[in-house]
Structure formats: structure tokens, C-alpha cells
Amino acid sequence: MKKKILIAILMLFVSFLAMMSTGNFFAKSGQSQVDVGSAGNFVILAKTGISTTGNTSITGNIGVSPIDSTAITGFALVMDSTNTFSTSSLVDGRVYASDYALPTPSVMTTAISDMEAAYTDAAGRTPVDYSNVGSGSLGGNVLLAGVYKWNSGVTIATNITLSGSSSDVWIFQIAGNLVTSSSTTINLAGGALPSNVFWQVAGYTELGTYSYFNGVILDKTYIAMDTGATLNGRAFAQTAVTLDSNTVGACGETVPVVPTPPVYYTLTIKTEPCSGSSTDYGTTTPPVGVYTYQSGTNVTVTAHPSAGWYFDSWILDDMYNVTTNSNTITFTMNSDHVLWAIFNPIEYPQRPPTTPPPVPSPPTTPPPVIPSPPTTNVTLTVLKFCFKPVTCQYGDISPDVGTYTVPVGTNMTFTAIDDAPPFKFYSWNFNGQELFGNTITVTVTANSTLYAMFTAKSPLYVISPPISYRTGLRHVGIA
């Protein structure tokens, strides 16, 4: 009989050792860390503001979104030259806000989204290992790793200890508020790490004066740190964080540099005939469409006119580009762009080349002196032109369009009047020379042509004079 008892005791002892060796003695679930994603680049994140008074000291980055930087108060922020972040004498790190320059807004949006996802992850962890410990009143407790759940708030009146290894994880699910009393400490023992401790709080969190707190606070509402309180961890609030002469550090980690994701812009390529209703006037390479390029990319687009058409000009972001007659244009993607390739029928006048023709070498012998011809009459033909393929409503010119016969050398003055909205007068063209100003005087020394050129005031066709001469206009003849 005694032998059977001894054997039974021995078997129980062996079972005990086996349970200890597998880590299941306390029958607690082994939990992984709560993934905070890009929120891990910050020690304080808030959606509605971060404020401080007194001599606060923060090691790590802080940020707000969707609220802008005006909700970060008490830090005397100094904007960096890049306008993507600011600094403060109270922060050993950087300060970010949703209204800073690109790409900070998207960085903050992602960080806040990851913070909210971490809250949801922590709130949903199962199985629950400990329920309503101390009925929500803690003090003097030693808490092993696992998932703790309270259907109420939690008050920590005196020191508690979290005991476990560096790989153990604590997740505290609190349905109400989390409040620590003054001068209390959340101790860590056995190698436990603050980065493995997660406090998911559905109410608010208040850390008492001169208390010392370890862990990552994931709060559904606000986090208030009373005077002198220290947080060795992170404060993630879905409303605001208020500080008062506090110390906040990122669980002993070095301050990370918030990564800057690449910025992308869109290019929309369109084509348009300068006149007529044809749909087969030309193509582009790349073809008409919408394209996405990383910021700083140099993009080249080439226009290919169809038979019977010639390439007229480029319009980039509502501005005429007439610096080149080339069918090819290259520009840098530093914002969203819209590029139009404009084509014209060959029967309409083309722009002269932007580079002057070569100057012929002077003759080696002086040419013979040709006597001046007797005074004769010459003609000046005055016409109106429209830049774009819309029904033109020209303004008036004085003298009006027509053909004038005058003696050689006659000076003639013309005035253009903007009295036909939405069209406006743009420039004159006298024998291929572009002249600006509503009133001009020309000297007629030979048979000549003077064009009064008008353009629409619509947003697509706004021009900022002066620019180089362009024709390629829709010929409308004599009005």
C-alpha cells in the first residue's frame, strides 16, 4: 500500500515538473505583442491635441492628426526649413502635424490609423486569463503575463509589479477609466519590458502626481498626466493628451526617424484641334490618358500630327508654352499637371520658328547704290484672329478691320478694345512681329498685314503676358 502511495506521489511530481517546463503551470495564454505599426515612430499621438505646461521633457517624436499644429500648445514650436516637421526645446525628437508640408499629412494619417488598429487589436485579444482582478482596485499586486479584463474602471492605489521575462506580454482590457494614485509605481520584474505592456482603456487615463508608469497606453478618449508624472512607454489617445511638467520616454528606445514615403503626382495628357471638328488631328507619346509619376521625375511627351495637320503648341496647366516649336516637351513632376497638345490644319498660318534664321555674311564688295524709288502707295490689311477653337466674340479695333491704301512710310495708329467678354485682346502681329499693348503705331513701308489677336478668358486659356510670339491661330478673316 505504501508503495502504491509513493508511486502516485512520484507521478504527481513528474507531472508538476512537466507542466513547469512547458510554461503551462499557470494555464495562461502566450500572447504576441500588439502591433502598433507606424505609430511606433511616436511616443505621443493624439487626434485632437497635445498640450503641456511646466518643464516637460519628451524623448521621441510626437504628432497630431487630423487636428492641425495649432492644437499643439505650450511647446514653442520652431518650424524646420522643410516645413515637414517642427522642433521644440521640450522634445528630443520631432513634432508632426497634419497641416505640415507633404508628405507629413499622409504620414500622420497612417500613424493615427495604425494607433486605432492597435486599440482594436488589444481590446479583442482572447482568451482572457484574469477577469476583474481586485474588482478593479489594485495595490500591492504581482501580475503575471497574460490578458486581464475588467468590466469596470481600474484604480491603482499603491505600487504593483508586473513579473515575467523579456518575451512575456501583458494586455490589460479596461472598460472604464484607468487612474493611478500619486507617487505610485508600476514596477517591472524578471526582465519584463515596458514595450510588451499594453493598457487598452475605453474611458480616460489619469496618471497621478509624481507617479511612475510603464507600458503603452491605448486610450479611446484622453490621457492626462498630472504634475511630475513619468511615463516609460507611449501615450496614444484618440482625443487629447495633456501634460504638466512630465517625463515621457519611448520605453528606453532611441528616437526613430519617421520615414518619408515617396510623393506621387498625376499627369493628364489631352489633345485638341485649334480649329475645325476633326477627330483625327494628331496623337501623343505617351498616349492621351492619366499617368502617375514620383515627385521629381522628368517626363517627356511628344506630339505627332496627322496628315494635313501640324503641331501648334503645348498648354501646360492652363499656361501657353511657346518657348519652343518642338513637338517634344520635357518638364518635372513637382505637382499634378494637365498637358494639352494643340494641332492646327496646315491651311492656317503657322508660327515662325523661335530661333532666328542665320545672318548671311556681308558681301566683300559694297553693293551698288540704288536710288530711292519715287513715292508710291502701299496697302495695309487689318484682320482679327482667335487663339482657340471656340466661337470667337471679338472686341472692337479702331480703325476697324479692312484694307487701307496709304503712301509709303505712313504711320498708322490702331487701338483694340476689350468689349466682348469672355474674350480679351492679347497682342498685335505686324508682318510677323508681335506687339503688346492695346494701342500701337506702325509704319507702313510696304504691303503689310496687321493682326489683332484675341483669346478666351476661360481658365484653360489664360495667358500671362508677355510671352514669346505664337500664331497657329484660327484664321477668321475680315470681320
Image (cartoon, rainbow, N blue to C red):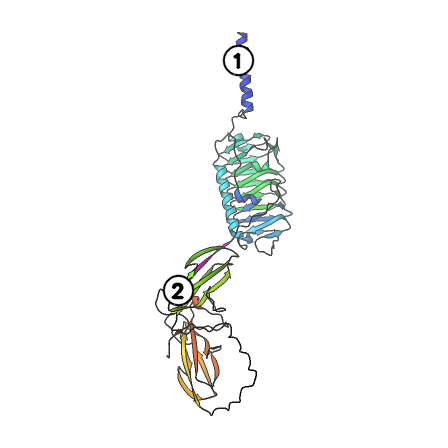
- The C terminus lies in quadrant: bottom left
Residue lying furthest front: 364
- Tell me what residue is drawn at x 55 percent, y 11 percent: 6
User: Do labels 2 and 1 touch, CB within 8 Å?
Assistant: no
Q: Quadrant of residue 395?
A: bottom left
Amino acid beneath label 2: Gly
Residue 23 covered by magenta stretch: no
- SS label for mark 2: strand
Q: Residue 116 vs residue 215: left or right? A: left
- SS label for mark 1: helix
Q: Position of residue 244 (x, y in %)?
A: 61, 46
Q: Which mark is residue 8?
A: 1
Q: Nearer the viewer, residue 200 or 435?
A: 435
- Range of residues picked out in magenta: 257-275
Q: Position of residue 377 (x, y in %)?
A: 43, 89
The residue labelled by disc 2 is 282
- Tell me what residue is drawn at x 52 percent, y 39 percent: 35
Q: Quadrant of residue 143?
A: top right
Q: Nearer the viewer, residue 175 or 36?
A: 36
Q: Nearer the viewer, residue 450 or 251?
A: 450
Q: Position of residue 11 (x, y in %)?
A: 53, 15
Residue 454 in view here = yes
Q: Within 10 Å of the Cα at label 1, are there few (<14), some (14-19), or many (20+) other Cα atoms?
A: few
Q: Position of residue 462 (x, y in %)?
A: 45, 68
Q: Quadrant of residue 282?
A: bottom left
Q: Which mark is residue 67?
A: none
Q: Nearer the viewer, residue 73 or 11?
A: 11
Q: Within 10 Å of the Cα at label 2, are there few (<14), some (14-19), or many (20+) other Cα atoms?
A: many
In the depicted structure, whether residue 203 falls above or below residue 398? above
Amino acid beneath label 1: Ala
